Image: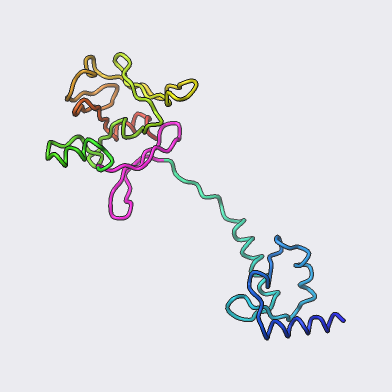
């Protein structure tokens, strides 16, 4: 009886074909069916391209499964720096706590775009190694002056705000519209009342990792 059934199955397969999704399930998907492959020696199965022995398809799936399991996990390097994205250079920023802040270009800075449109002197640019905290930290964060410091906190919508970063600034810096300074090994520039920090210094001091 078993030989008659196998002969009938083989005849149907050769005449009509079997979709690949049903022809040769992998061992881990259907162990019970896989155990019967020893009884299907010589059975040809349509794999989507041609008729092939069922046991060959099963062996390939098993080999692929073992290969995938043997590969080391992919680890993404959390490191701030300049990288090519297509044909343009972007600055990728990671905060010191390991949080990804994003990738940035000159065009992401609103002041840069406004100055370009108005044909005014340009602000310190990302492409030249300068970035503002307002660019690095989006609307999910709160950036405020506190005495002679600029403070980055979690959003005020949080039940309990958390201070993430506190950077010293020169006395009277808050009220300046422009200027240059160096505080705690950080180079600062002021443009249109906005403070820009040197990217290289932010990385060297560990504020960006």
Q: Main secondary structure of the magenta part?
A: strand
Magenta residues?
79-106
Name the residue nearer the viewer: 96 or 137.
137
Q: Is residue 167 left or right of residue 30?
A: left
Residue 91, image quadrant: top left
Q: Is residue 18 left or right of residue 159?
A: right
The quarter of the picture where the C terminus appears is: top left
Q: How is the image coloured?
A: rainbow
Q: Residue at x 28, y 51 (%)?
A: 88
Residue 118, image quadrant: top left
The quarter of the picture where the N terminus appears is: bottom right
In the orientation shown, which residue stands out farthest toward the front?
A: 157
Q: Position of residue 201 (x, y in %)?
A: 30, 31
Does 2 lie within the magenta span?
Answer: no
Q: Position of residue 121 (x, y in %)?
A: 13, 36
Q: Is residue 27 above or below residue 127?
A: below
Q: Is residue 162 left or right of residue 26?
A: left
Q: Position of residue 160 (x, y in %)?
A: 49, 20
Name the residue nearer the viewer: 69 or 189.
189
Q: Is residue 52 left or right of residue 159?
A: right
Q: Is residue 22 above or below residue 154?
A: below
Name the residue nearer the viewer: 40 or 71.
40
């Amino acid at each position: 009886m078993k030989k008659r059934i196998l002969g009938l199955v083989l005849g149907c397969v050769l005449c009509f074909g079997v979709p690949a999704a049903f022809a040769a399930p992998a061992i881990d998907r259907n162990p019970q069916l896989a155990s019967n492959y020893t009884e299907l020696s010589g059975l040809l199965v349509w794999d989507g391209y041609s008729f092939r022995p069922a046991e060959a398809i099963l062996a390939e799936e098993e080999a692929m499964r073992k290969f995938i399991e043997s590969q080391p996990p992919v680890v993404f390097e959390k490191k701030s720096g300049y990288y090519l994205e297509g044909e343009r250079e972007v600055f990728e920023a990671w905060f010191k706590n390991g949080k990804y802040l994003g990738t940035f270009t000159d065009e992401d800075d609103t002041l840069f775009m406004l100055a370009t449109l108005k044909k005014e002197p340009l602000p310190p640019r990302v492409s030249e190694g300068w970035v503002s905290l307002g660019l690095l930290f989006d609307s999910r964060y709160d950036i405020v002056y506190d005495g002679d410091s600029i403070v980055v906190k979690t959003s005020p919508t949080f039940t309990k705000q958390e201070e993430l970063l506190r950077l010293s600034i020169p006395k009277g810096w808050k009220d300046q519209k422009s200027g240059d300074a160096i505080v705690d090994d950080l180079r600062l520039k002021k443009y249109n009342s906005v403070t820009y920090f040197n990217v290289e210094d932010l990385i060297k001091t560990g504020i960006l990792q």
